[in-house]
Image: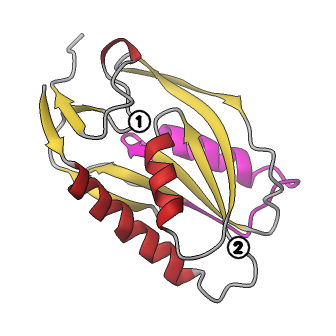
Amino acid sequence: MKILYNKEQIQTAVNKIATEISNKHYNDPSPPVMICVLNGAFMFFTDLVKALNIDCEIDFMRAKSYTDQSQSEVVIFKDIETDIAGKNVYLVDDILDSGNTLRHIIKHYTTNPRMAPASITPVVLFKKRLSNINNCLYGIELTDESWLCGYGLDGPNGLMRNRNLIFGFEPEID
């Protein structure tokens, strides 16, 4: 395991995204809704909303698509409580890998007429180079296939989320 990103690199990426969101909504009469996808995005989300220069609504949801390092069906364990109908929504997650989780969540919110946001923009700290999802804001594009942990992302046995650095290690091969 090695350190891939230090605190300064992470904060630079967070600030870049926060500036983009703040600039877009600076004169917007209704504040955007920032939704944190738990558990992995909690540290990124906290730093991101603190770096915004605008007001925003905040809510949390929990979805899971990985067991250890294996991707499986997306399950929503906790949904938001905020009314997002007609609002600009930012869906904040830790990493864009296959895009399955974010696509599932976006579909969950956009196909429900009761929710119907004006817009929904995925936001991730890390984006794998070959992954793609429409209108995704990201801080760092990954150039290798290391499994990331730290800064909210879990490592072996679900540990290391509390570290303020990003570590990488080679993925397990089945």
Q: Which residues are magenta?
A: 94-121
Mark 2, Cα crowd under 10 Å, few <14 / some 14-19 / many 20+, is: some
Residue 96 painted magenta: yes
Position of 125 relative to 22 (above/below): above
Number of callouts: 2
99 with respect to 173 (left or right): right
Quarter holding the C terminus is top left
Label 1 to label 2: alpha-carbon separation: 26 Å
Given residues 165 and 28, the one toward you in this image is: 165
Toward the viewer: 65 or 28? 28
Residue that carries the numbered disc 1 in the rendered image: 152
Q: In the visual, does 9 lie left or right of 105?
A: left
**Residue 80 occupies which quadrant of the picture?**
top right
Cβ–Cβ under 8 Å for marks 1 and 2: no
Instruction: Classify residue 86 as left or right of residue 26.
Output: right
> Is 31 in front, or is 163?
163
Q: Which residue is mark 2?
A: 31
* Type of amino acid at the residue the image marks with label 2: Pro
N-terminal label among 1 and 2: 2
Q: Is residue 129 visible?
A: no
Q: Secondary structure at mark 2?
A: loop
Q: Residues within 10 Å of mark 1 (few under 14, many from 20)?
A: many
> What x and y, as percent, mark residue 50?
51, 61
